[in-house]
Amino acid sequence: MRIAIIGAGSVGQTLAQGWSKAGHAVKLGVLNPKAEKYRSLPAAQLTTPAAAAADAEIIVLATPWPKTEAAIGGLGNLAGRIVVDCTNPLTSGPQGMGLEIGHDISGGEKVAQWAKGAAVFKTLNHIGAANMATAREFKVRPAMFVAGDDAAKKPAVLKLVGDLGFEAIDAGPLSNARLLEPLAMLWIDQALVRGRGPDFAFALVKRG
Ligand SMILES: NC(=O)c1ccc[n+]([C@@H]2O[C@H](COP(=O)([O-])OP(=O)(O)OC[C@H]3O[C@@H](n4cnc5c(N)ncnc54)[C@H](OP(=O)(O)O)[C@@H]3O)[C@@H](O)[C@H]2O)c1
């Protein structure tokens, strides 16, 4: 598939590697593709967000939460498009990590308001970036939940997540992003606060 990843930080770069390896055509969209920090990335993949998104079949948001509304605004009309939202609306302060919005709304649902008419899916937010292209290296297949409302477009997103090596699991409607964003906090807490480190994933196992 033709995939546009908006943002080329930890998540954007790793997803680009993983999907390129799986045979997808990936473009990375950043505001300044010529910036020194992107020198090591394949030049053919790097472009502006609007150019990356123009003919993409799937648009993936890998931007910091505070920049996400503006990033979506730079992509033009997204009606009818598939948008995969990997962002997390996290805050940090003296009390530790928190959610900027949550419980009765989610970042995923805000993204759907900003990307009017797009089919928005929340996924690839509840694991550390370093595991996103190495899911096949786990002894038990890591789980990756996918929440979104468009039943017709969901199989394409589940397939794309599966192509990275995850067990892609339909997590129901986009409003269940309210569950997946705190799950990202649990992953971060385990990795950084409980001392587990970043090389782990959640898995779903069945009795019998
Ligand atoms: N890091 C993780 O392990 C992880 C895991 C799961 C989910 N997430 C979530 O995924 C998102 C990205 O995380 P990250 O760690 O990859 O962030 P990051 O390393 O800070 O990278 C963010 C990227 O977004 C770009 N960007 C900023 N504003 C933009 C705009 N308006 N249009 C296009 N690109 C823009 C930045 O470019 P410039 O720097 O050039 O502005 C940079 O390339 C965050 O919402 C995070 O919460 C992160």
Image (cartoon, rainbow, N blue to C red):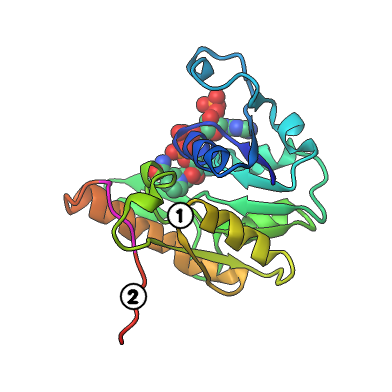
Q: Quadrant of the C terminus?
A: bottom left
Residue 45, by quadrant, is top right
| Relative side of 14 to 25, left or right | left
Residue 106 located within the stretch drawn in magenta: no
| Relative side of 139 to 60, left or right | left
Element type at marker 2? loop
Q: Position of residue 7 (x, y in %)?
A: 57, 34
Q: Residue at x 76, y 56 (%)?
A: 118
Category of crowding for the residue at label 2, using alpha-carbon neighbours closer than 10 angstroms: few (below 14), some (14–19), many (at least 20): few
Residue 201 located within the stretch drawn in magenta: yes
Q: Residue at x 47, y 38 (%)?
A: 14
Q: Which residues are magenta?
A: 198-202
What residue did someone put label 1 on?
Answer: 165
Tell me if residue 95 can be seen: no
Q: Nearer the viewer, residue 188 or 69?
A: 188
| Relative side of 35 to 131, left or right | right
> Under 8 Å from ligand 1: the CB of mark 2?
no
Q: Nearer the viewer, residue 36 or 105?
A: 36
Element type at marker 1? loop
